[in-house]
Amino acid sequence: MRFEIITIFPHIFDSFLKTSIIKRAKDRKLINIKIHDLRKWAVDKHKTIDDKPYGGGPGMVFKVDTIYRTLKSLNKDRRKRQSIVLLTPQGKQFDQKTAKRLSKKDRLILVCGRYEGFDNRIKKFVDEQISIGPYILNGGEVPAMTLIEVITRLLPKVIREESLKEESFSFKSSINLEYPQYTRPEVFTYKDKSGKLKTLKVPKILLSGNHAKIKEWKEKVL
Ligand code: SAM
């Protein structure tokens, strides 16, 4: 899977790419991530990529011509199973089902906005529009990282398959959330606000060693 990101702030991704599962997936060549600075495709000496919106309104919007040139240039290397995704609050809300669908592609181009967003005509040159939730972020970079992280987890060999099977939003049941988990100590003792000693115990069934009963408990507990 090749992820390509179009952004005006390439350095935001520095530590994200060098950490944990994403780093390991890159090192093992299970994913490839390329970052493109949108300003590379600006044509004036000031490297302008935005302008004031027609009809007035606050802030600046990304110009259609710069994004068009960027996508045209990246499309020279077009793949059969690719998708150009515009990250925008007006897009379809991202979820595990969309992540599964996108994990079958072999190239995803993620277009990150900033400021007040995009000239609306940019939408003509993308395949889909995705929002990561009903709230406003400063830019599309955190949404891009969200998509990359969620999709990478679903790629073969990145995470152990049995870990994925029992994760929230992957169950076939209507509840679709993972059961509560516990680890040592078996009994946790703490003081409440009035200084009284209190204990929190691990549910007995999880200590029973009875795998059939534990499975039943996990399915019913939520
Ligand atoms: N003026 C825009 C609006 O009201 O819809 C918000 C622009 S936002 C400050 C700048 C950029 O951040 C957007 O163009 C988009 O790329 C990204 N962005 C912000 N919130 C997002 C979200 N929930 N999902 C995906 N992208 C988002």
Image (spheres, rainbow, N blue to C red):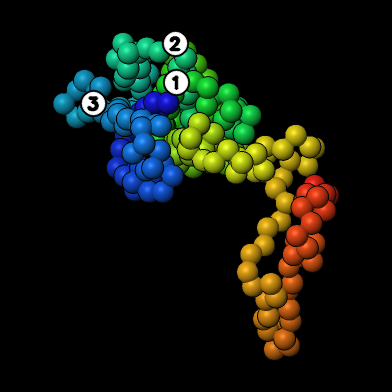
Between marks 3 and 1 in the image, the one whose residue lies nearer the viewer? 1
Using a 10 Å C-alpha cutoff, classify the residue at mark 3 as few (fewer than 14 neighbours), some (14 to 19) or many (20 or more). Answer: some
Q: Position of residue 179 (x, y in %)?
A: 73, 51
Which residue shows up at 44% across the image and 10% down it? 80
Q: Which residue is mark 3?
A: 40
Residue 153 or 144: which is nearer the viewer? 153
Q: Which residue is mark 1?
A: 106
Where disc 1 sits, the SS reads loop
Question: Based on the displayed image, in which of its 4 quarters is residue 98 positioned?
Answer: top right
Q: In the rendered structure, which disc, 3 or 2, sits on the residue that comes first in sequence?
A: 3
**In the rendered view, would you say 85 is above or below 185?**
above
Amino acid type of the residue tagged 3 in the rendering: Lys
Residue 190: give its label: none
Which residue shows up at 39% across the image and 26% down it? 2
**In the rendered view, would you say 148 is above or below 55?**
below
Question: Based on the displayed image, in which of its 4 quarters is residue 191 positioned?
Answer: bottom right
**Does residue 143 appear to the left or right of 63 in the view shown?**
right
Query: Distance between the Cα atoms at labels 1 and 2?
Result: 8 Å
Which residue shows up at 80% across the image and 37% down it? 174
Question: Based on the displayed image, in which of its 4 quarters is residue 173 positioned?
Answer: top right
Q: Which residue is mark 2?
A: 80
Quadrant where the N terminus lies?
top left
Q: Are marks 1 and 2 in contact (CB under 8 Å)?
A: yes
Using a 10 Å C-alpha cutoff, classify the residue at mark 1 as few (fewer than 14 neighbours), some (14 to 19) or many (20 or more). Answer: some
The answer to whether the beta carbon of the residue marked 1 is less than 8 Å from any atom of ligand 1 is no
Q: In the rendered structure, which disc, 1 or 2, sits on the residue that comes first in sequence?
A: 2
